[in-house]
């Protein structure tokens, strides 16, 4: 027969109260951080849900409107897509470890898809891509590259390159006027550019690689498929 609660207390003393908070320094801070992270993830999902219908409605307005109205609606549609990518970056950062499965992919195709997204949003870029077999989460890598392209200023043409160097698949973006190294040196996001660069760096790191910046070029690498 199991002992009563008072009997167990008399033999062992009362159990510790909230062990993580009392016995481990910083436990309460971690607990609050976990709660905040869960709320942020929930908020990001709620913010993202209406963006799809908004984007669809804007595309219908563009098709049925005069050129002037279509231009304004097109600008709104582009920013809607930009918001979707930003929210996706938040959701990527808040995901549980190992929650997304990698799959065999061609990094050149992923980069080309990212370039198409960037071009729709108004970024001028050319693509020079060599086929590279990699194991990645395709959507995450595509959005990471597209986010880097989104850092390129207007009237600047970016050159997106994909190549294989030994056992590494390399992605580089060359664009004048972008302080890649300053954004990458930030310990935490300070503006949209640093948020996109740091988010991309996290994606490359998650895939076993890294992101580096030199002058007007930012370059990332991940291992090629075994």
Image (cartoon, helix red, strand yellow):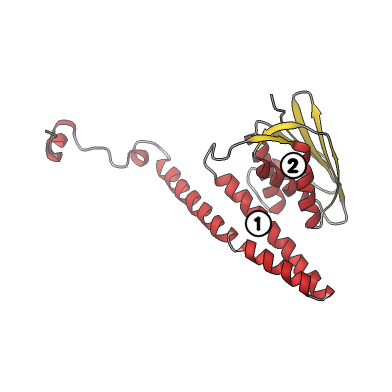
Q: Is residue 167 left or right of residue 92?
A: right
Residue placed most toward the observer, 31 or 77? 77
Tell me if I can see residue 144 in this picture. Answer: yes
Point 58% across, 45% down: residue: 93
Please identify the quarter of the rendering in which residue 198 is found.
top right
Q: Is residue 102 left or right of residue 78?
A: left
- Badges 1 and 2: C-beta atoms under 8 Å apart? no
Circle 2 SS class = helix
- Name the quarter where the C terminus is drawn: top right
Point 28% across, 41% down: residue: 17
Point 79% across, 44% down: residue: 112
- Name the quarter where the N terminus is drawn: top left
Tell me if I can see residue 213 in this picture. Answer: no
Please identify the quarter of the rendering in which residue 95 is found.
top right
Q: Position of residue 34 (x, y in %)?
A: 46, 46
Residue placed most toward the observer, 164 or 176? 164
Residue matched to label 1:
84
How many other residues sit within 10 Å of disc 2, few (<14), some (14-19) or many (≥20)? many
Q: Is residue 199 left or right of residue 216?
A: left
Q: Which is more N-terminal, label 2 or label 1?
A: 1
Q: Position of residue 86 (x, y in %)?
A: 65, 53
Residue placed most toward the observer, 215 or 139? 139
Circle 1 SS class = helix
Question: Looking at the image, is 123 positioned above or below residue 212?
Answer: below
Q: Nearer the viewer, mark 1 or mark 2?
A: 2
Point 59% across, 64% down: residue: 50
Residue matched to label 2:
110
Q: Position of residue 126 (x, y in %)?
A: 87, 46
Query: Gap in Å between the C-alphas at discs 1 and 2?
Result: 18 Å
């Amino acid at each position: 027969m199991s002992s009563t609660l008072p009997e167990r207390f008399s033999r062992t003393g009362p159990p510790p109260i909230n062990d993580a908070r009392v016995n481990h320094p910083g436990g309460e801070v971690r607990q609050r951080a976990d709660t905040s992270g869960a709320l942020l993830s929930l908020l990001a999902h709620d913010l993202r849900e209406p963006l799809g219908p908004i984007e669809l409605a804007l595309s219908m307005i563009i098709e049925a409107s005069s050129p002037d109205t279509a231009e304004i609606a097109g600008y709104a549609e582009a920013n809607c897509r930009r918001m979707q990518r930003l929210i996706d970056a938040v959701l990527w950062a808040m995901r549980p470890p190992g929650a997304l499965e990698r799959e065999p992919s061609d990094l050149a195709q992923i980069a080309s898809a990212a370039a198409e997204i960037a071009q729709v949003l108004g970024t001028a870029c050319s693509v020079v891509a060599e086929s590279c077999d990699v194991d990645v989460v395709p959507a995450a890598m595509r959005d990471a590259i597209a986010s880097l392209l989104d850092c390129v200023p207007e009237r600047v043409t970016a050159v997106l390159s994909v190549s294989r160097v030994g056992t590494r698949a390399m992605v580089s973006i060359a664009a004048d006027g972008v302080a890649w190294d300053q954004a990458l040196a930030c310990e935490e996001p300070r503006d949209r550019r640093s948020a996109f660069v740091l988010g991309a760096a996290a994606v490359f790191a998650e895939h076993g690689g890294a992101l580096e910046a030199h002058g007007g070029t930012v370059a990332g690498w991940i291992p090629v498929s075994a």
